[in-house]
Amino acid sequence: MLRSLRLGLCLAPLLLAACGGGEETTLAETCTADGGDKAYCECRAKSLAADMSDEDLALLVKMTRLQKDESISTEEAQERLFKDAGPARLMAFQFAVMAPLMKAEEKCL
């Protein structure tokens, strides 16, 4: 019984992520709160979720939440998130986000 409970607790985040529960919602809500049209923001969030790796998408969502929760700039959020990972990881992340963002803009406008 305890083993199945542990397995269930480990699988819950994976199931939520597979359903698009957190990432897309966070990105869309933040975009809308920043003045974006709801349909555009939802399209953009869906497009980003489809085109980014899970690791980079998780970092983008984490950065978005950090900016929103603490009212800080993108640069400050990046500095905090990549302090330990270093500049090479930050640069890799920025390049990984660039193409999906451009694709989302073209698709959703």
Image (cartoon, grey):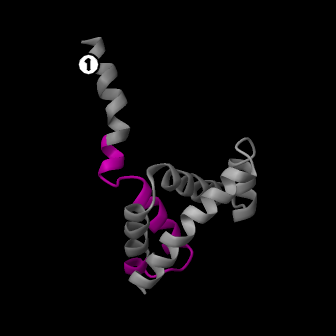
Please report the residue visible at 29 percent of the width from the left and 27 percent of the height from the top. Answer: 8
x then y, percent, for residue 20: 34, 55
Quadrant of image for the C terminus: bottom left
Q: Which residue is mark 1?
A: 4
Left or right side of 46 for 34: right
x then y, percent, for residue 107: 39, 82
x then y, percent, for residue 39: 37, 79
Please report the residue visible at 44 percent of the width from the left and 82 percent of the height from the top. Answer: 37
Position above or below: 9 against 73: above
Residue 68 visible (yes or no)? no
Quadrant of image for the N terminus: top left
Q: The disc labelled 1 sits on which kind of residue? A: Ser
Q: How many marks?
A: 1
Please report the residue visible at 30 percent of the width from the left and 42 percent of the height from the top. Answer: 15
Of 64 and 89, nearer the camera is 89
Of 55 and 40, nearer the camera is 55
x then y, percent, for residue 90: 68, 55
Left or right side of 86 for 53: left
Does the magenta-highlighted stretch encompass residue 94? no
Where disc 1 sits, the SS reads helix
* Main SS of residues in magenta: helix
Residue 56 visible (yes or no)? yes
Label 1 crowding class (10 Å Cα cut-off): few <14, some 14-19, many 20+? few
Left or right side of 8 for 109: right
Does the magenta-highlighted stretch encompass residue 36? yes
Position above or below: 80 against 71: above
Position above or below: 39 against 5: below
Q: Which residues are magenta?
A: 15-40
User: Which quadrant of the structure image shows residue 52?
Assistant: bottom left
